[in-house]
Amino acid sequence: MGKGARRGGSRGSARARRSIGASGPPLGALSHTPDRTEWRGGREFVVRTLRGNSEGRVYRCPGCHQELASAVPHYVVWPHDGMLGVEDRRHWHTRCWEIG
């Protein structure tokens, strides 16, 4: 191997990857998009789009009352002024929220 050749990739790029990882979550770690707000029935709701995961949880969609597996991309919705915190969150099928 010549003087300028590198084995196994660039050491500099490894350092760059570590510094990027130190300042935020690793790539692919975020399972949702940034939250947004929507108005429905005179109330403001926070809407989070989840990409789906392999946790194996099952929720009940309040729109259609059918099961919603955590592996399926869907929305998590809660009132913007929600007093109950996590207890106010509801998992919706994407289409059910959109037509609701």
Image: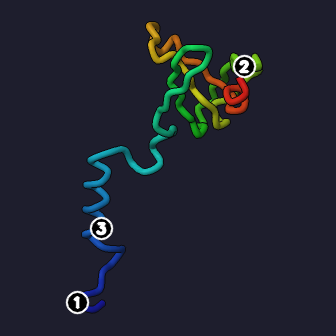
**Residue that numbered label 3 is attached to:** 13
Query: Which residue is painted at 46% across and 41% down in the image?
Result: 30
Compared across the picture, whether 54 is left or right of 26 comes to right
Q: Amino acid at mark 2?
A: Gly
Nearest the viewer among 57 and 85 is: 85
**Residue that numbered label 1 is attached to:** 3
Mark 3, other Cα within 10 Å: few <14 / some 14–19 / many ≥20: few
Residue at the left extreme of this rendering: 3
Q: Nearer the viewer, mark 2 or mark 1?
A: 2
Q: Residue 19: name its quadrant.
A: bottom left
Of the two numbered discs 2 and 1 on the same chain, state the one appearing first in sequence.
1
The CA distance from mark 3 to mark 1 is: 18 Å
The CA distance from mark 2 to mark 1 is: 65 Å
Q: Position of residue 68 (x, y in %)?
A: 70, 26
Are dots 2 and 1 in contact, CB under 8 Å? Answer: no
The CA distance from mark 2 to mark 3 is: 48 Å
Element at label 1: loop
Q: Position of residue 33 (x, y in %)?
A: 50, 39
Residue at the front extreme of this rendering: 42
Q: Amino acid at mark 1?
A: Lys
Of the two numbered discs 3 and 1 on the same chain, state the one appearing first in sequence.
1
Q: Position of residue 80 (x, y in %)?
A: 46, 18
Of the two numbered discs 2 and 3 on the same chain, state the one appearing first in sequence.
3
**Residue that numbered label 2 is attached to:** 63
Query: Which residue is painted at 54% across and 14% down in the image?
Result: 43
Nearest the viewer among 86 and 40 is: 40
Mark 1, other Cα within 10 Å: few <14 / some 14–19 / many ≥20: few
Element at label 2: loop
Compared across the picture, whether 65 is left or right of 17 comes to right
